[in-house]
Image: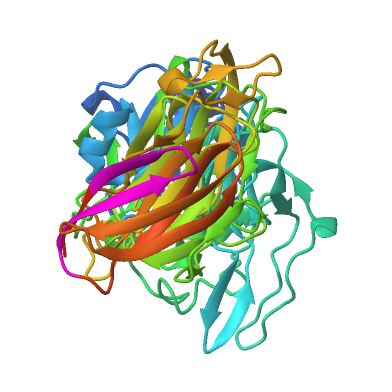
Amino acid sequence: MAHSHTVGRFVPLSANICFVKLLLCILLIPSILAAQPDRSSTQSGYNWVEITDDYDMPEGLRIFNEDNLKAWYVEVDMTREELALHPYLSTTQGLPSFSREVGSLAAINSGYFSGGTSLSTVIYPDGDIRSQNPQTLSRDGRTYYITRGHFGVMQDRSMSVDWIYHFTPRFSDLYRFPEPVPNERGEPAARPSRDDGSPIEDLLVGMGGGPVLIKDGEINITFTEELIWGGVGEFDETRARTAVCYTEDDRALLFVANENPGMAFDKLADVLYDLECHEALNLDGGGSTHMTVGDELVNTPFVNRQIPSILAVVPADSVKMPDDMTEPEDAVILDTEMDNVTLTDGWSESANEGYYGESKSLIAEADDGNETATYVPDLEPWHQYEVAAWWVAAFNRAENTPYIIHHADGVDTVRVDQSSDGSRWNTLGTYYFRGAGQDDIIISNDATGSSPTSFVVADAIRLIKTGEVKTTGAEGALTDEDGSDVPDKMKLGQNYPNPFNPVTSIPFYLPESDHVRVRVYDSLGRLIETLADRRFGPGRHQVTFDAGSISSGMYIYEISSSEHRMQRHMLLIK
């Protein structure tokens, strides 16, 4: 940035006077130079004062304040390998408690959010995408594809600000672009193409926001292209601001400015440019603007807002370094569009981004178990697998969604909070399975949430073989020479859920092909319904009973074949 000053006219003097003045200048030069402030102390009329001594900060961290701007920045020397930048995503909380939770040396709030759900990209090491920038936004009744801003730290500790787009939730489908999608107000641009960008293959961690403020050493505020308008304020609106940038000599600056006097986007870009930022990104501002050193609040936010994501300076040894960023080769992944996933009629597509693969997440209103999604994996018999689930989190998601896992040793129900930890694999447990299509995992809408209307999510399920093998099956079942499940007798399992309202599943097992009837009776022995009356092959099966038309009470279900008859009880509570 150019700066000008006025030079006065030179008045001729005698040689002696000139000599004396020259001598004085030579003598004073060392003291003048010694009195010059640090390069970041006084810039273009701003009076940045270093206040590092006011805090307990390690080498490589410095903090500065500009009182007239009511602004602060933490400078991170990224050449010091003991320091690292890391974004974090958690349940909403104040920045001081968030900082304590992750053990940060310094931190600022980061991307946009709604309720407890991040609306900006958060990427952990190993290609672990915890949340995503939106693919589309609606303005004035139109749908716009957007490439939003992103700040990334690479595996070699270099930094970059880019416009990015998530084609799918997979790390391999995260692309950056040299220019944003050229949206204009009222004129949506075409969807970005992979051909116009490139994967961010060497990314260590990343965090989304917007708009980009400085790119390649030039102020370039892509306010319109990123659809910031109509969402978080207008271009010339002054408010509290949070931003992150980096310099060409590998310093990262974490920046905040209070609401009063506040800054518009162009003022913020000018200030960061003046601080020698080579590339810069705006983050969520207003009442979200916070900065901490340790867990001590530095600025005075006008609203003490709870936030779900932060950008923190942490000890480098606390950061997990990347391993292989691809799915394991032997991973078994079931998604909702596949033939071996069966859905009841009450599921619909979610509009939220962050789903796995090409098919959108499905949602069903939390109720009493009347809606299910059943996944039947084709696994190697009697092998142990780690089971993980993917869902898209939102504030109105159920907080105790059941995953009912039928495995070699019985049935386990794992309940998860789908209002958080979305768009990533969440481990449910490790189990032995019978294999050969005889196991299943069921998502039920028998759940509740804190919103007046809450929804359960059905998305992908992943199973990864651990290498452990079971030598004998569950409940007396044995493995023959080829490892298949051979039950030694017919068995009738306990219905699930139990108690139920109004839908439940009844499992049973056959040692060989047989004609089977499954019937339900009331407590007086009167037939209520015949659920099955046909021939089944050997192995595990299940039927579903819908008690929507009958009253609460104890009921009996029975399985009978040509040689056996078995009964169990179940409880309907409405």
Which residue is at the far top?
471
Q: Which residue is rendered at x = 39% and y = 44% of the image?
A: 403
Measured as percent of width and height from the top left, residue 29 is found at 51, 25
User: Quick check: 57 above or below 217?
Assistant: above
Q: Which residue is rendered at x = 47% and y = 28% of the image?
A: 489
Indicate yes or no whether the magenta region holds residue 560.
Answer: yes
Q: Which residue is rendered at x = 31% and y = 22% of the image?
A: 57
Magenta segment boundaries in residue numbering: 551-569
- Residue 8 visible in this rendered orientation of the protein: no
- Would residue 218 appear left or right of 240 to someone viewing this image? right
| Quarter occupied by residue 118 | bottom left
Q: Is 567 or 476 nearer to us in this picture?
A: 567
Q: Main secondary structure of the magenta part?
A: strand
Q: Which residue is rendered at x = 58% and y = 86% of the image?
A: 142
- Would residue 476 appear left or right of 107 to someone viewing this image? right
Measured as percent of width and height from the top left, residue 100 is found at 24, 29
- Would residue 41 appear left or right of 337 to someone viewing this image? left
Measured as percent of width and height from the top left, residue 290 is found at 28, 48
Report the quarter where the C terminus lies: bottom left
| Quarter occupied by residue 546 | bottom left
Indicate yes or no whether the magenta region holds residue 428.
Answer: no
Q: Is 459 or 120 nearer to us in this picture?
A: 459
